[in-house]
Image (tube, grey):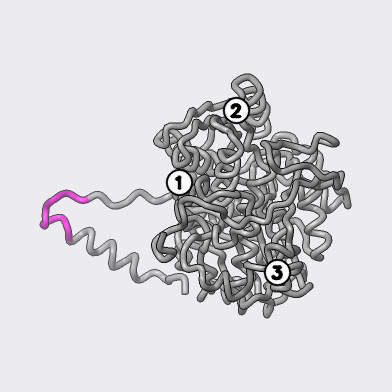
Amino acid sequence: MNQQVGLPVAGSTGSSLSHLEGALSGLSYPAGSLAGLDPADGKPLLARYDLPTAAKTLSKTSVGTRAVGGLWRWRELLPVQSWEFVVHMGEGSTPLAPAGRLGPKLGLSNLLFKQESLNPTGSFKARGMAVAVSRAVELGARHLVAPSAGNAGGALAAYAAAAGVSATVVMPSDSPMVNQTEVLVAGANLILLDGLISDCGRLARLIADRLEAFDLSTLKEPYRVEGKKTMGFELAEQLGWRLPDAIVYPTGGGTGLVGMWKAFDELQALGLIGADRPRMFSVQAEGCAPIVRAFEEGKRFAAAWDGATTAAAGIRVPSAVGDFLILDCLRESKGAALAVPESELTRMQGWLAAAGAGFLSLETAAAVAAVPMLLEAGRIDPNDEVVVFDTGAGFKSEPPRDLLRPLRVPNDPDQWEGILSKLVEKESQPRLH
């Protein structure tokens, strides 16, 4: 197939996947069958690659010539073996955009946004599900199940449909209606549970056991993180094969942080970047901040957060199976974890849109709200190159409750003068510059 048009539909991808490794135990396992958690300790398994083999075809030059394929441009360091099973809907290759007038207003001279909200399903979850679904189907899965606060469920439904397999999504009953609709429109089974995502995870596990479905829960299988790590690959490439001073990332299950940290090590092993690493900052909401609490207490594992609550559904995750991987990354990078006030989320979401950043998710708003806090604490410098991850589009969340109602006018020109007067009055008010 013409590479300018699309990816091949058959043949080897050139993946250098070698084996699976226990993230905590260090034990090795074959990668040729469906796998969940490490049998030795119930912790995540991570994919490992034959990096010398990957280096034969993956270079700065070769990846630069791959005009199409999104995240699959990095195929040597992805697990899918055959193009026959690759499901690609355009995920990856998202822009890294200067924040324009936003950076100076936040106190930064070099602020960049990694625009993950431009992925096919409106969030960075498309990356993880593209790779995890493709690999699971390659290994024989025909029914996939996962708990989700919203965006991951929509992505699972979309990619399962594209792969021609069944999917079941278990969501908290108060998940955004747009996420519920996305799952149903794609033809997946949707179960709404009166509880948190951790409760949904238990039901998903039961469904997997009883219906012989494969569980794609966050970090409870080894390949969603492989899709997420491509954000780190792209970041290095987009910055001319170097990394920024700091990365600010809204954190629920943490696969993005874990994946990028893994990506940086792989890139260094291939000789594509040096040893310098960005300071990694994990952002949570005050109503659900298990990683922040564990970081501040100096612990390697995070206790579950009781009574988790925040309007940012994507970071309302009371416990993360990859907690130690997140915390290791933060400490090794000399970064930190911090919680932002709940009141800042909708305020910042509106402020970002009015400043020209677009209608971004509450999770992204949380990450941006952390920037002034990091500056005040001296953890970042005004002249640092800081990348904030825009992880999802605002339309994927429930709309703010305090929006002003739009003007509704009769189709009567005699009454339009009053409307024009109101617009003149509004336009005379100070703007955000």
Q: Residue at x 55, y 58 (%)?
A: 72
Reading the image, the residue beneath label 3 is 246
Give the quarter of the figure containing the N terminus.
bottom left
Question: What kind of element bears circle 3?
Answer: strand
Instruction: Answer whether residue 376 is visible to the viewer in this image.
Output: no
286 up-or-down from 174: above or below: below
- Cα gap from disc 1 to disc 3, whole angstroms: 30 Å
Q: Is residue 214 left or right of residue 413?
A: right
Magenta residues, start to end = 409-416
In depth, the one of 126 and 83 nearer the eye is: 83
Reading the image, the residue beneath label 2 is 213
Question: What kind of element bears circle 1?
Answer: loop
In depth, the one of 420 and 355 nearer the eye is: 355
Q: Residue at x 81, y 34 (%)?
A: 39
Sequence-wise first label, 3 or 2: 2
Q: Is residue 192 left or right of residue 226?
A: left
Task: Mark 1: give few (<14), some (14-19) or many (20+) Cα within 10 Å.
Answer: few
Q: Is residue 297 left or right of residue 68?
A: right
In depth, the one of 32 and 376 nearer the eye is: 32
Amino acid at the residue labelled 1:
Pro
Query: Is there CB contact under 8 Å for labels 3 and 2?
Result: no
Residue 289 lies, in percent from the top left, at 73, 46
Amino acid at the residue labelled 2:
Ala
Question: What kind of element bears circle 2?
Answer: loop
Q: Residue at x 63, y 19 (%)?
A: 210
Q: Residue at x 62, y 32 (%)?
A: 214
189 up-or-down from 285: above or below: above
Reading the image, the residue beneath label 1 is 399
Amino acid at the residue labelled 3:
Ala
